[in-house]
């Protein structure tokens, strides 16, 4: 069973930066897709960025391109997923979720909820103007 644990959320001013991290456990050694999604108040869950567990083919939705950077890595033997968020805007305020695809999907693009089999518990990001 895949488990995802996020950290790094917080409250910042517009224009500031924040980095979210996610530790992935129970995952296959084969390549699969990982992503960040977010839930804003009154809105449907939306994708933010995705990348393969091998660190290839990062992809972003248009509203965060050039401001957010997704990366995956290995930290003391554990698979990690990070999201560096620069030039934050009030509209980035949301609960951010680390997500992983089915182990049978090896692509690096999973910017749609139907690709996702696992979500973390979420971490809150609040950007004030």
Image (tube, grey):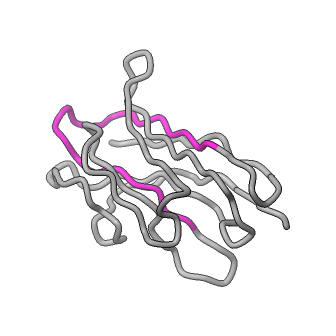
Give the tally of numbered discs: 0
Foreground residue among 96 and 119: 96
The span picked out in magenta is 19-38
- 28 lies above or below 17: above
Residue drawn 49% across the image and 41% down it? 82
x, y (%) of residue 111?
A: 35, 67
Which residue appears farthest toward the top when viewing the image?
76
Residue drawn 48% across the image and 51% down it? 98
x, y (%) of residue 81?
A: 44, 40
Residue drawn 44% across the image and 21% down it? 75
Q: Is residue 4 left or right of residue 122?
A: left
User: Dividing the picture into quarters, in which one does residue 89 lie?
Assistant: bottom right
Please name the predominant secondary structure of the magenta segment in the image.
strand
x, y (%) of residue 64?
A: 52, 64
Q: Is residue 94 left or right of residue 31?
A: right
x, y (%) of residue 42?
A: 67, 84
């Amino acid at each position: 069973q895949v488990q995802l644990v996020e950290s790094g959320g917080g409250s910042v001013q517009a224009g500031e930066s924040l980095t979210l991290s996610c530790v992935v456990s129970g995952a296959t050694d084969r390549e699969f897709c990982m992503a960040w999604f977010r839930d804003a108040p009154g809105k449907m869950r939306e994708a933010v960025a995705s990348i393969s567990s091998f660190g290839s083919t990062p992809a972003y939705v248009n509203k965060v391109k050039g401001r957010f950077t997704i990366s995956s890595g290995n930290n003391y033997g554990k698979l990690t997923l990070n999201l560096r968020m620069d030039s934050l805007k009030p509209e980035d305020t949301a609960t951010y979720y680390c997500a992983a695809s089915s182990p049978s999907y090896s692509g690096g693009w999973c910017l749609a909820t139907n690709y996702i089999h696992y979500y973390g518990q979420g971490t809150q990001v609040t950007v004030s103007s």
